[in-house]
Image: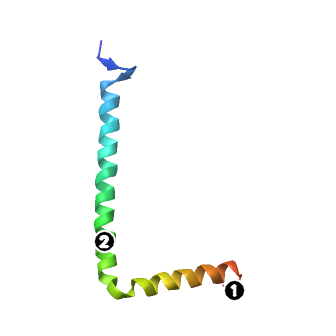
Amino acid sequence: MRPDYGGIEVEDLLKIVLVLVVVWLALEILGEVLGLFTALLGPFRPVLGLVVVVLIVLWLLDQI
């Protein structure tokens, strides 16, 4: 008989921990990529935000 804690087998707990670690690593990598992208934009970040706002307003007004 395998040990279990709270009705969950140890192997299932290890799988959950493994999935959480993979998600954590993926989020770390994504954060680094986005950080690099925003660093490359530099002073153009406010302009990019303004473009996004204008596009959303135009879409809401059915202009695009």
Quadrant of res 55: bottom right
Q: Which amino acid does label 2 sit on?
A: Gly
Q: Where is residue 17 in the image (x, y as percent from the top left)?
A: 31, 38
* Residue 61 left/right relative to 45: right
As helix, strand or loop, the secondary structure at mark 1 comes to loop
Mark 2 lies on residue: 35
Q: On residue 63, which mark appears?
A: 1
Horizontal arrangement in the rendering, residue 14 relative to residue 57 (left or right): left
For the C terminus, the quadrant is: bottom right
Point out residue 9 in the picture as x, y percentages from the top left corner: 34, 23
At label 1, which amino acid type do we have?
Gln
Q: Quadrant of residue 40?
A: bottom left
Residue drawn 65% across and 84% down?
58
Q: In which quarter of the image is residue 12?
A: top left
Colour pattern: rainbow
| SS assignment at label 2 | helix
Contact? badges 1 and 2 (CB < 8 Å):
no
Q: Residue at x 63, y 81 (%)?
A: 57
Q: Which of 12 and 42 is in front in this view?
A: 42
Q: How crowded is mark 1: few (under 14 residues within 10 Å), some or many (20 or more)?
A: few
Residue 30 at x, y percent in the picture: 33, 63
Residue at left offset 65%, top offset 80%: 59
Residue appearing at x 29%, y 17% in the figure: 3
